[in-house]
Amino acid sequence: MSTQVHRRRRKAPRRGDAAPHWLVQLPYLLVLSGVGAGLTLCAFNYFRKGSGLMAAALLIGALARLLLPESQLGPLAVRSRSVDCWTLVILGEMVAFVSLSVPPMNKTGLILAGAFGVLIALTMAVRGGRLLLTGRSSPSRKRSPG
């Protein structure tokens, strides 16, 4: 006896005023082209400019994910809004930190690299503190009522 399971694909809600398909892909394409152009610059021995462009593209992607509704983001919306934004911001800041800390470094670059390092450390400390204060536990650790 064979049974077939019919699964429905989950589709994003489309309204009559929804953006055209190519416009939905625009934020993702901007981030992707920024990272691609940055990698190209790095390949041509312009490491600081290329990694700065990649960092800017990731931070613009985080801003787009924060401000635009999910129906206009396309593949840029993968997880929840907060997880996507934090991931893009932390990756963008880390790439910017690396681009500013590569020798030869002047005094301004050292100050900016230190500021990015402090910002990343503060972000991680705040997130860790919030997780400790809220006392989130995994689903397997939940106590049964009674």
Image: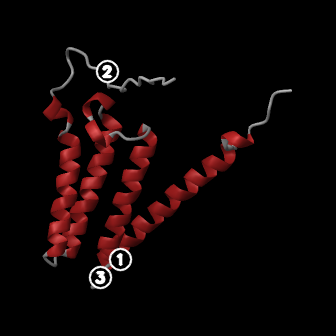
In this view, the residue in front, 14 or 57, is 14
In the image as oriented, which residue stretches furthest toward the bottom? 104
Residue furthest to the right in view is: 146
Which residue is situated farthest in the front direction here?
1
Q: CA distance from mark 3 to mark 2?
A: 50 Å
Instruction: Tell me the SS state at disc 2.
Output: loop
What is the crowding at mark 1: few (fewer than 14 residues within 10 Å), some, or many (at least 20)?
Answer: some
Q: Is the residue 138 above or below the residue 51 in the image?
A: above
Residue 40 left/right relative to 138: left
Residues packed near mark 3 inside 10 Å, few (<14), some (14 to 19) or many (20 plus): few
Disc 1, SS: helix
Could you say whether the residue bearing mark 3 is in a helix, strand or loop? loop
The picture quadrant where one finds residue 37 is: bottom left
Three-letter amino acid code of the residue under disc 1: Leu
- The image position of residue 110, as x and y in percent, is 35, 77
Real-space Cα separation, disc 1 to disc 3, in angstroms:
6 Å
What residue do we see at 44% from left, 24% from top? Answer: 4
- Circle 2 is placed at which residue position? 13
Q: Which residue is mark 3?
A: 105
Query: Foreground residue, 104 or 139?
Result: 139
Inter-mark Cα distance, 1 to 2: 47 Å
Q: Closer to us: mark 3 or mark 2?
A: 2
